[in-house]
Image: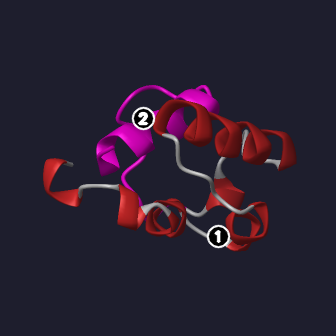
């Protein structure tokens, strides 16, 4: 999984156009980021990439980059 793959999955989860997110965006400012989309994102990351994200860690994330940092050991930022 690349950083770009993770961002695309978040964009899909939030029903956003591709390449809408770059990383520094605050999650609270994203229109569809709520508790349901949080759970959906966690489930989709597990399903598509086999990465289990602790819900308690995800809810502490403030930005898109914070979410990506949770997956950093599993992402390849060079391919982003």
Where 59 sits versus 44, above or below? below
* Disc 2 from disc 1: Cα separation: 18 Å
Query: Is 9 in front, or is 73?
Result: 73
Query: Element at badge 2?
Result: helix
Q: Residue at left 52%, top 41%? A: 50
Image quadrant where residue 23 sits? bottom left
Q: Earlier along the polypeptide chain: callout 2 or callout 1?
A: 2
Left or right: 39 as drawn, with respect to 24? right
Across and down, in percent, residue 38 comes to 74, 48
Where is residue 18 drawn, in percent x and y?
39, 28
Task: Tell me the element at label 1.
Answer: loop
Magenta segment includes 15:
yes
Q: Residue at x 66, y 41 (%)?
A: 41
Point out residue 67 in the picture as x, y percentages from the top left corner. Answer: 54, 62
- Compared with 47, 37 (above or below) is below
Q: What residue did someone put label 1 on? A: 61
Q: Quadrant of residue 13?
A: top right
Q: Position of residue 21 (x, y in %)?
A: 42, 46
User: Which labelled disc corresponds to residue 8?
Assistant: 2
Give the magenta-colored segment's residue range. 1-25
For image coordinates 84% across by 40% down, the residue present is 36
Which is nearer the eye, 70 or 30? 70
């Amino acid at each position: 999984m690349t950083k770009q793959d993770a961002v695309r999955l978040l964009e899909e989860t939030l029903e956003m156009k591709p390449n809408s997110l770059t990383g520094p965006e605050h999650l609270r400012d994203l229109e569809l980021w709520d508790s349901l989309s949080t759970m959906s994102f966690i489930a989709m990351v597990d399903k598509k990439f086999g990465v289990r994200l602790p819900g308690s860690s995800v809810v502490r994330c403030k930005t898109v980059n914070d979410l990506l940092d949770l997956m950093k050991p599993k992402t390849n930022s060079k391919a982003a």
